[in-house]
Amino acid sequence: MSISRLTITPQDIEQHYAVISKIGNLGPSPEDGYLRAAWSNEETAAMKYIEQAALQAGLTSRWDALLNLCVETPGDYTEWVECGSHLDTVPQGGNFDGAAGVVSGLESLIKIFSSDSSRKRGLRLRVWRCEESATFNSVYAGSLGAFGQARPDCLNNHFRGISLAEAIRSQGADPDYILYGKRTISTAELDSIAAHIELHIEQGNLLEKEHLDIGVVTGIRGPYRSRIILRGEFDHSGATPMGTDYRRDANLALGYILVELDKLAAQHISQGADLVQTIGVINSQKDWNEKHSEVYQNAVTKVSGYACFTLDARSDDGVFLAAYREEADEAIQQTAAKFGVEAEQSLIGFEPGIKVLDSHLAGVIEHAAQELGLSCKRMPSGAGHDAAIVGKQKKSNGLNVPVGMIFIPCRRGKSHSPDEFTSFEAIAKGASVLAASLARLAA
């Protein structure tokens, strides 16, 4: 098949964004940001648009018990080549994180299907629910749930007054699949996946700075995320002498803990570890503070008796990340104890990354980019993606599902904010690489 027949244009991409950009938008302009929360009316509406566009092009669709969407080429196949991503967003997020991959996958399937060429393997687009953790503090709930691996306690997490279980039911899906670890993807379906590729914006600025069209992803970092509560004692700020003999100052302990965590991370990075670490929230996570209102007892004239923060550490090495988690936990406890403060830690999520993605798929993607005359570079993914969940699934033969990823540049590397942007031209280039890769793998 001529690769030119699979070229996807900016206009192909724009037609879908003309609809999706009006779903979950927080204002008349994209710069106002988006919110398509997990298992919300907005996430469902965006997914139903993708289904409608697929059906109009002659493709088929089906929904699993958690209402993850599958779009497929018609026909019976023993093996399938997949692509996939998500349509949910963080609060006040952009419209390209995830959505660019879904739209690219849809157009890729349409182009290949309309070419009328014979294929040995079927083609499938998966649109996952709840990739983002920023709403219900549960990352990859859709893809993990499909493989029976989501944490049941995530169903009790709340966003804007409703639990995740309630949100799932509100869309007609069944949270019992998560509660009891029931898979929506059978062993036979898992065994039939010959390859899975996800296209995504880079969420960094390497491609833009180096004026490159395509990133061929070599590995995916996984996150360890926790929330830490520090409990001291509230006292008068003027009458209580300074020092740990008199004060149990939660905010002071917090400051020293953050310094110790930064030192710990720097030590491992200097020794060659793949690690990034972020303190994302300090005393300010709205939904959490509504349940733990002690933070509002802090005042200008008080010694702080309560503090909380979040820790997000990421690495492509799951073994290292598990060990680092233990070291970080110990550093938090030891430092808190020096100030007479109790530290209570709760796990938000831990998902090991993938150090090396499938080398054959990386070669297929790289070759497709070169054939299209596009510049490309092999690079790791600093962010986590549903592709990492797929890539950890073992088939009956003991082998993991082969996974690849395609990155496209985004402006100034911005993501998870209204500033998130990539052009239809950039998406079209990535989509063309995706289509050419899928076609070769399915031939």
Image (cartoon, rainbow, N blue to C red):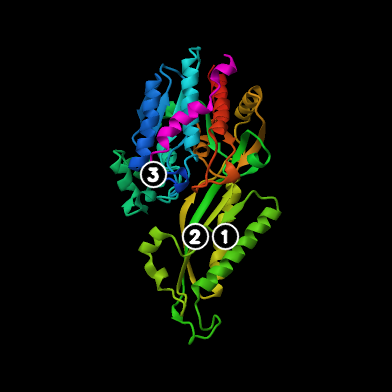
User: Residue 212 vs residue 166: left or right?
Assistant: right
Q: Is residue 266 above or below residue 430?
A: below
Callout 3: few (<14), some (14-19), or many (20+) C-alpha neighbours within 10 Å? many
Figure quadrant of the C terminus: top right
The Cα–Cα distance between marks 1 and 2, rounded to whole angstroms, is 17 Å
Q: Nearer the viewer, residue 85 or 358?
A: 85
Secondary structure, mark 2, is: loop
Q: Residue at x 56, y 46 (%)?
A: 414
Which percent across, then down, holds residue 125? 45, 28
Read off the residue under disc 2: 281
Question: Magenta stretch containing residue 172, yes or no?
Answer: no
Q: Is residue 14 magenta?
A: yes
Label located before the other in sequence (1 or 3): 3
Amino acid carrying label 3: it is: Ala
| Label 1, residues with CA under 10 Å away: few <14, some 14-19, many ≥20 | some
Work out which residue is located at the far right of the displayed protein and give it: 271
Asked where in the image residue 182 lies, by quadrant, the reply is top left
Amino acid type, residue under disc 2 in the picture: Val
Mark 2 closeness class: few <14, some 14–19, many ≥20 residues within 10 Å: few
Mark 3 — residue? 38
Question: Of the numbered discs in the image, which one, if any, rests on residue 328?
Answer: 1
Give the distance between the C-alpha atoms of the residues marked 1 and 3, in whole angstroms: 30 Å
Residue stretch in magenta: 1-24
